[in-house]
Structure formats: C-alpha cells, structure tokens
C-alpha cells in the first residue's frame, strides 16, 4: 500500500455536463452550473492542506472497524460543518444525513466482506461526510479526506430541476469513496489515460457496491452510475453506463453522453483533464464484458481481479494497455494460466480494442502541461467558449 494522497478534487458530475447546462439551460440553470464550478474551485487550496494533513500521518484512523461521522454544512461551504450523526447514532430523519451514513456503511461492508479491506486506507480510516453543502451545489466529491455532497438544484422551480440530492444513489457514494482507496493504493495520475483509469475504477467499484447491496448478478444489474440522480425533466437513466457507454443520457440541456466504448472512438480533448470522465468508458466496458463472460456475482471474480490489480499492480502512470496486461496477469496468478477467468479478461479488453500482452508495463510520458480542471472550464464558460 502506498502512503499519502495524490489526487485533485474529483467530482461525480463531469465538467462537460456542467458546461452543456451552462450553454443550453435557462438563466437559472446556467447560474446553478456556474455556481457549482465556482464552489468546486474554492477547494483547490484546501486540497493542498489536506494532502499535508495526510502526509503528516494525521488521517482519521480509528484502529479498525466501521466508524462514520456525517456533518451538516447547513448550505455553507465550510467544512466539515456540525456533526449530525456519529457511528451508532439513530437515524435523524434528514434524508441526506441518513443516506450518507448508510451509503458509507454499505461501501465499507462491501470492501470488508468482498475483499477483506478495512476502510479506504485498509487500516480503519474513519469515513467522514458532509451534506447540505452550498446552495444549489450540483455535485459530490472526495477532497482527499472526506466526502462532500450537494443537494442538487432543489431550490429551482420543479420544471427546471435536473438533479436530485447526491446522496440518493449508493453507487455515487461508493464511487467517490473509491477515489479515496485509489489515493492510498495505485495513486493514478488524474490526467488522460491514467486519470480515465482512476475514474473507471471508481465506476467499477461503485456499481459493484450497488450490486452487492441488491444481491444482483451481472445479468440482473443495470450497470448504470447514478440511476435516480436525474429528475424526470432529464432524458437519461444516469451519468454513465458500463454496459453501453455513450447511451446513459441524450438530453437537450445536458447534451449527449460522450463516452466511447472502443479505442477507435477515443477522444483527445483539452478539457476534463484530458477526458478522464469521457474515455473511462473504455476500461469500464472492458470490465463489464469480463463480468458478463464470467456470470454470477461480478464482485466475486471480475471485481477481485480488478481489486488486486488496483492494490498491488497499478502505478501512477499506468495506461489502458498496462491495465489490460496487469489484469490478465493477475487473473492467471489467482485462477491459473489459461483459466476461464483469464480468458474472460482477455475477451473484455479485446472487445474495446486492446490486445493483452504479458510484457512488462510500458513507460508512459507524463503530461508536459498542467491538467485542465474546473478552473479553466469555468473561465471558458464565463468567456462563452468551449475548452
């Protein structure tokens, strides 16, 4: 296990979706989208302090076992806010508080029962969450130390609302908490292919947590991230689909899901840190196909291969080819060379245009420019142009 986080603020709603809302929405929806980007940007400085906090060994380690604390920001941007519910406390009646509490517990139990992992860092780190963050904050994020959830645009008129509260989907909670696991394990760079792998791992374990909760097999699951997040005003089923990338939504305000499902559709873009929320559709689909080939509960074999690869094999600069090679190698080490499990991994990557190799992980070239994040996206929106 690596020590210390290596991540920027990572939000569940990608910047291209907020950008589309700002361009296509009403004046009120545009204001909401720009406000979300502005509030996210305010945490850039706080992230640096959070990294120093963790590097100094001051992370909230409990010594093992489930320990949740949910705070209420009371519609401010001050973190963590006032404690609303601690471990073992009864439900509060506040849906956001109780959903954040239950979702953190479900995620913890998934990792504990499926993979023997004790919390985000593997050493019993406390799970901290803040709800009711900001006014009209259309996002949820992991900031290197805790989860933060907005309430969506609940204050807009019903006909204009696009997002429900961000605690309503357990896979969103698990997605963001998995970013915490990544910061303590592979520490994948949040740019281009390593960044898309980072997002994909969160999507994979997000949907697996939901499937674990519902006891769904690979065939029964919907493979959607964020089902229930959109209001009835949106033409879409969720933010992303692992089963069919590019089909999760097609809406006049949000735009069309831009995710590719194959390397021949890979998108080289200058925004979203090189398309980390876009090109993640490729490794997402590779995992789905692997799970489909194996059948049964996806977390048991396909998920275990991906988990061991994340924990023991991936490094900060790993790209898609490295992930394919390493999952293939891990499948052999767990289930045997030429096993059904290893062949399923091969098939998964083949279906997205990547041929696995047993060669060592190829070197990757680090970015020569600073990644384009929320700050540049916000500037471009205010100037009325795309990145």
Image (cartoon, helix red, strand yellow):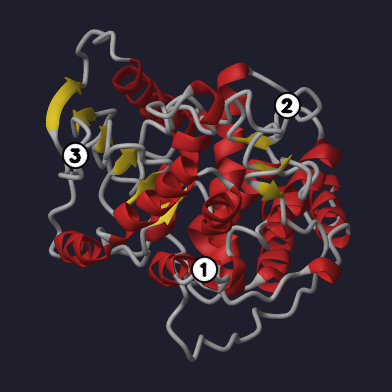
Mark with earlier residue (3, 1): 3
Disc number placed over residue 221 in the picture, else none: 2
Q: Which residue is mark 1?
A: 384
Residue 376: % across, % down: 43, 73
What is the CA distance from the residue labelled 2 to the residue labelled 1? 40 Å
Nearer to the camera, 205 or 32: 32
Taking the image as shown, residue 5 lies to the left or right of residue 106, namely left
Nearer to the camera, 320 or 40: 40
Q: Is residue 44 above or below residue 308?
A: below
Q: Which residue is mark 3?
A: 76
Residue 89: % across, % down: 19, 13
Residue beneath the point at 88% across and 57% down:
351
Nearer to the camera, 175 or 229: 229
Q: What SS does tag 2 mark?
A: loop
Residue beneath the point at 38% across and 21% down:
99
Taking the image as shown, residue 288 lies to the left or right of residue 207, namely right
Q: Within 10 angstroms of label 2, few (less than 14), some, or many (20 or more) residues?
A: some
């Amino acid at each position: 296990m690596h020590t210390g986080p290596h991540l920027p603020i990572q939000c569940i709603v990608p910047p291209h979706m907020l950008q589309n809302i700002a361009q296509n929405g009403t004046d009120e929806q545009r204001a909401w989208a720009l406000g979300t980007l502005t509030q996210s940007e305010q945490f850039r400085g706080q992230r640096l302090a959070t990294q120093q906090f963790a590097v100094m060994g001051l992370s909230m380690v409990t010594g093992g076992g489930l320990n949740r604390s949910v705070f209420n920001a009371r519609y401010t941007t001050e973190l963590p806010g006032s404690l609303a519910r601690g471990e073992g406390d009864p439900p509060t009646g506040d849906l956001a508080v109780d959903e954040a509490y239950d979702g953190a517990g479900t995620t913890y139990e998934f990792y504990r029962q499926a993979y023997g992992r004790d919390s985000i860092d593997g050493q019993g780190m406390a799970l901290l969450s803040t709800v009711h963050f900001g006014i009209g904050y259309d996002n949820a994020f992991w900031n290197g130390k805790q989860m933060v959830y907005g309430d969506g645009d609940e204050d807009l008129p019903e006909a204009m609302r696009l997002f429900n509260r961000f605690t309503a989907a357990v896979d969103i909670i698990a997605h963001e908490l998995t970013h915490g696991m990544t910061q303590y394990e592979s520490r994948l760079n949040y740019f281009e292919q390593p960044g898309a792998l980072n997002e994909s791992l969160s999507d994979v374990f997000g949907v697996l947590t939901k499937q674990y909760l519902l006891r769904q097999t690979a065939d029964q699951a919907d493979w959607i991230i964020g089902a229930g997040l959109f209001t009835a005003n949106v033409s879409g089923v969720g933010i992303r689909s692992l089963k069919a990338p590019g089909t999760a939504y097609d809406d006049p305000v949000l735009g069309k899901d831009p995710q590719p499902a194959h390397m021949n559709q890979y998108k080289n873009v200058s925004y979203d840190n090189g398309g980390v929320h876009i090109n993640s559709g490729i490794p997402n689909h590779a995992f789905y196909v692997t799970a489909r080939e194996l059948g049964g509960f996806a977390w048991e074999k396909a998920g275990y291969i991906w988990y061991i690869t994340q924990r023991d094999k991936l490094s900060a600069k790993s790209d898609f080819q490295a992930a394919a090679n390493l999952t293939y190698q891990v499948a052999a080490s767990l289930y045997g060379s030429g096993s059904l499990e290893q062949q399923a991994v091969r098939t998964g990557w083949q279906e997205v245009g990547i041929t696995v190799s047993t060669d060592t992980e190829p070197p990757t070239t680090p970015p020569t420019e600073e990644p384009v994040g929320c700050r540049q996206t916000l500037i471009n929106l205010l100037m009325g142009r795309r990145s």
